[in-house]
Image: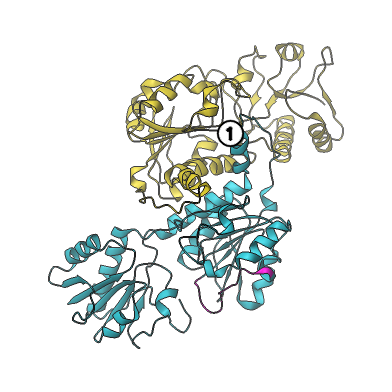
Chain colours: A yellow, B cyan
Amino acid sequence: MRISFCCTDTKAQPWLEGLRAAFPGAEVEVWSAGAAPADYAVVWAPPQQFIDEQTQLKGIFNIGAGVDALLKLRLPPGVPVVRLDDAGMSVQMAEYVCHAVIRHFREFDGYEADARQGKWSYRKPRLRTDFPVGVMGLGVLGARVSRALAQFDFPVAGWSRSAKAIDGVKCFSGQAGFNDFLAASRILVCLLPLTPDTDNILCRDTLARLRPGGYVINVARGSHLVDEDLMALIDSGHLAGATLDVFRTEPLPAAHPFWTHPSITVTPHTSARTLREESIAQIAGKIAALQRGEAVAGVVDPARGY
Amino acid sequence: MRISFCCTDTKAQPWLEGLRAAFPGAEVEVWSAGAAPADYAVVWAPPQQFIDEQTQLKGIFNIGAGVDALLKLRLPPGVPVVRLDDAGMSVQMAEYVCHAVIRHFREFDGYEADARQGKWSYRKPRLRTDFPVGVMGLGVLGARVSRALAQFDFPVAGWSRSAKAIDGVKCFSGQAGFNDFLAASRILVCLLPLTPDTDNILCRDTLARLRPGGYVINVARGSHLVDEDLMALIDSGHLAGATLDVFRTEPLPAAHPFWTHPSITVTPHTSARTLREESIAQIAGKIAALQRGEAVAGVVDPARGY
């Protein structure tokens, strides 16, 4: 068996060692142009040439949850494309989103600004019933984030393409449920896959439907959000601000106004990192399953886009 | 029935209105020296004179969870002293503590400092197994905080005077379990009642037993912590820092070094506020129960101190 590793922005050596340890008999190598075709590919944003050279693939493993970059390539028909399935990401996402929601709801930014001036301040407690949270995307990550938020007694709504049911979460679905979902939300969390249907979904039309004082948390992809529309709605006073972890161009360019906007918190795509050990173990387990002819979880539907 | 309201630092009118609405026939008044004795007292840090004038009390209701200030007074023997029992405080405490723990674990302070300089930074993800959290005090607040932390997959230990059992939390108790509890903790959350036994409990001896890189979150009472010992252990490098919401003197004096210490976050006793509506409803329910001769929850044992 031959496994080819082709991941941009990723230190290869620990992955090679981990995969070799899992499959002692296999050849596990970093791809170079013209290398022998592999049985399995472990990829992150590979070039089209890599795909084109693979003539005998039995599986393509994406070392992240979002496959939007991969699906832009011409992929060999019939070869399963498999994304990471949690692998330690959902708990990180729950942490990131709960931290951002609590920080906004409890005004901890304001308290810290006061404290920097040595000011012992009083702010009237807010009612959590005034801060319903809406989660867009109810896959592995969205479901865990929703449950984590519900634990803090926030009213939580969820929206997904197809209907879902999650305890303690008011679930909406499809185009028919979209406006009702938005009207029920004040804090909006985007955890959608990036597809042609969800590109630019956080635009003026959408964000204007949030309750006044709305707040946006984008932890999915930068292309979900129309940057200028967000800023216009903050500057007009309809939205209170945003916490953004993902951007159209990453790293976020130095001149981008998000960096200095007083109501926008920027983090460097750190909400849920691929954890190497968990991911290697998951991918190795799935390769072994495919070898045995078994089905695996996390297979992407290219037509659906995730 | 006569209810006397004697609470420092509290706007009386909404409380009077709430209690009058609950008991239409009752006299509900703010205490003034020499007023007729009441059947029930609703108090926060009342003067001794108030207590001394009450000759027919059937219950004293403290509008907070901590009764340390009240128990310093000479109280009439046999009159139940009742503290608030959650009343919306445990969820606030869970929010505050989870926010502080996540913020420290995920280094969000550091990311924000980088972002203020327009810097897209990378930090190696930390392992949550390296950040076990220890919660001191497993009453209503401590139990909820422990469960909330466990939900984020942190290893959670708890310590209390008498033995407790909480799902997903490794429980230690009493003096015998104290050092093992500390050695198992890196982030230490104090939610103890303030009693002669717990006064100054967060001292050099105790804090030095935390794992290296320890972090202290005090949301109980300022007198639990020996301020100088905390700062000495941070400055020596054994502790990484602290988030403090309570202080020996409140408001925290302008000259106190906590305000400007780079590794200490100060908030103005805001972790869990008394929520008026929930508290009035709870106290009214308990007065009605006492009137009917029934037992109520939250009765303080003065010998134990909470």
Q: Is residue A83 found left or right of A277 in the rendered image? A: left
Question: What is the quadrant of the C terminus of chain B in the image?
Answer: bottom left
Q: Is residue B30 found left or right of B159 in the rendered image? A: left
- Relative height, residue B214 to residue A181 (above, below): below
Per the image, label 1 sits on a secondary structure element best described as: helix
> As rendered, which of A154 and B108 lies closer to the eye?
B108
The residue lying at 68 percent from left, 41 percent from top is B125
The residue lying at 64 percent from left, 54 percent from top is B241
Q: Main secondary structure of the magenta part?
A: loop
Q: Which residue is mark 1?
A: B116
Question: What is the quadrant of the N terminus of chain B in the image?
Answer: bottom left
Magenta run includes residue B202: yes
Q: Is residue B40 found left or right of B191 in the rendered image? A: left
Q: Would you identify the image quadrant in which residue A60 lies?
A: top right
Q: Is residue A12 visible?
A: yes
Spot the residue most to the left: B25
> As rendered, which of B140 and B270 lies closer to the eye?
B270
Q: Is residue A198 visible?
A: no
Dot 1 amino acid type: Arg
> As rendered, which of A115 and B130 lies closer to the eye?
A115
Magenta run includes residue B192: no
Q: Would you identify the image quadrant in which residue A32 lies?
A: top right
**Count of numbered tags:** 1
Q: Chain of mark 1?
A: B
Residue B212 place in picture, x, y as percent: 73, 58
Residue B223 place in picture, x, y as percent: 53, 70
Q: Would you identify the image quadrant in which residue B84 lies?
A: bottom left
The residue lying at 39 percent from left, 81 percent from top is B73
- Relative height, residue B108 to residue B297 (above, below): above
Stretch of the chain drawn in magenta: B193-204
Residue A99 place in picture, x, y as percent: 52, 44
Residue A95 place in picture, x, y as percent: 55, 44
